Amino acid sequence: MAQVLEFKLPDLGEGLTEAEVVRWLVEVGDVVAVDQPVVEVETAKAMVEVPCPYGGVVTARFGEEGTELPVGAPLLTVAVGSAEATESRGASGGPSGDGAGSEASGNVLVGYGTGAPAARRRRVRPAPVGQTPAPVTAAHQTPVTAAHQTPDTAAHPAPVTAARSAPARASAPAPTSVPVLGVVDPHGPVAVISPLVRKLARQHGLDLRQIAGSGRDGLILRTDVESAIRAADEDAAAVPSTPTRPEADTSGERIPLRGVRGAVAEKLSRSRREIPDATCWVDADATELMAARAAMNTAGPKVSVLALLARICTAALARFPELNSTVDAEAREIVRLTGVHLGFAAQTERGLVVPVVRDAHTRNAESIGAEIARLTEAARDGKLTPAQLTGGTFTLNNYGVFGVDGSTPIINHPEAAMLGVGRIVAKPWVHEGELAVRQVVQLSLTFDHRVCDGGTAGGFLRYVADCVEQPAVLLRTL
């Protein structure tokens, strides 16, 4: 006999708490194998294909494409041990067995295992309206958390445990109250289980402590929040209008700040809030650097300008390690980092991402260039992993590819500095005492003023400019 198992959205790591369903890879009725990817989701860090730890027939999917689901929410259900699944596995030489344990994968993602399924828990159903609920003891109740909910229980959660509610009295009438604003103790706990209910209230600016729940023991349901939203809209419509100045038009397209764009927005905002940054810049004659690159490319694999600048940065950080640091605000300490993990800004269809070249201080220009090319291709395909987007210690931002000369970069929190590079363009320049046309680039350094003063930042930037103008300066560090 087939057993239906529920597969929930696992913890995808890196502190991520939710993901958006981008594309379903299976349909209801499809036979899936153990560890077969069943859905593609987008987190704040990357696109991820989620494998199912069970083999069987898909009986239900939860969440349309474009829906945002919290970690622990149901993704799909699989009938394990069904005739269709057994026949398919037998034909393909896959695993077979009678129990759920034989249908489970040995692989795991963070936060969920794939051993034998947990025993089914008995759920206490609430009594119909108008009837007296039977007394329920702690021994017969099962705690309900957000990770155990299905779409139905998210909207109509099961009763809370006896430890959180007073025991029901046999003579007490069943609750028949409707949501009323302003009757809940503002200092008591908020009786909400579903994270979807909390999110709905937050989106509409409602205080859950001001909503009385119609569920058992005052549990706030989704219908309660929706009723409060309608009541607030009706109150707003009933207020007589008074002559005021016309308000600004806000009827344009609304784009949710979520996924990669949301993560970038949060990181940049945090950088501005927490880091006292300063910026200095200099124009440099890049004619000799471009000539050196042309000579290198005729003698071997092509090396990009970005790779050369990255190598110059690692040499500069060896001389000025203060800029390869981070600040531990709680401990009030500056942490100087031993290795250079160089991030570089890459523009993709999904937004701006910053892949990280690991151990850049141990690489030459050719090795750095090859790694930049590999990570850039993965970024454009949306295949970067969270590990490839985190852990940077210094960032290089080449905004010259957009045809602009200068900028004031925002530091990639929690790093201490970012070097911005403008376009390399022919300009009049005084060279060896005479006016000439030279290839000129503007370099901008934004740094955390807590880790160093302007003298250190200026020394770093001047060294980078000297290497750009006279690449032979690098020979002393190679």
Image (cartoon, helix red, strand yellow):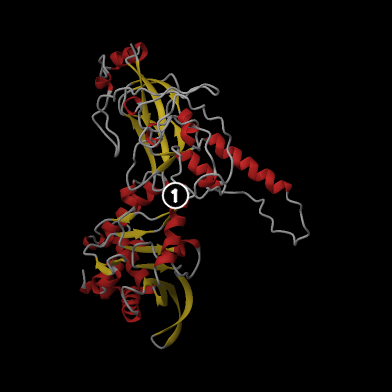
Quadrant in which the C terminus appears: bottom left
Q: Position of residue 285 (x, y in %)?
A: 40, 76
Residue for badge 1: 260
Quadrant in which the N terminus appears: top left
Label 1: state its secondary structure: helix
Q: Is residue 416 above or below residue 32?
A: below
**In-front residue for pair 282/321:** 321
Residue type, numbered disc 1:
Val
Displayed quadrant of residue 335: bottom left
Specify whether 329 is left or right of 441. left
Q: Residue placed at 27% from the left, 69% from the top?
A: 334
Disc 1 residue crowd, few under 14, some 14–19, many 20+, Cα 10 Å: some
Marks counted in the figure total 1
Q: Is residue 53 above or below residue 190?
A: above
Q: Residue placed at 43% from the left, 52% from the top?
A: 263
Q: Residue placed at 42% from the left, 41% from the top?
A: 19
Q: Is residue 454 above or below residue 138?
A: below
Specify whether 41 is left or right of 213. left
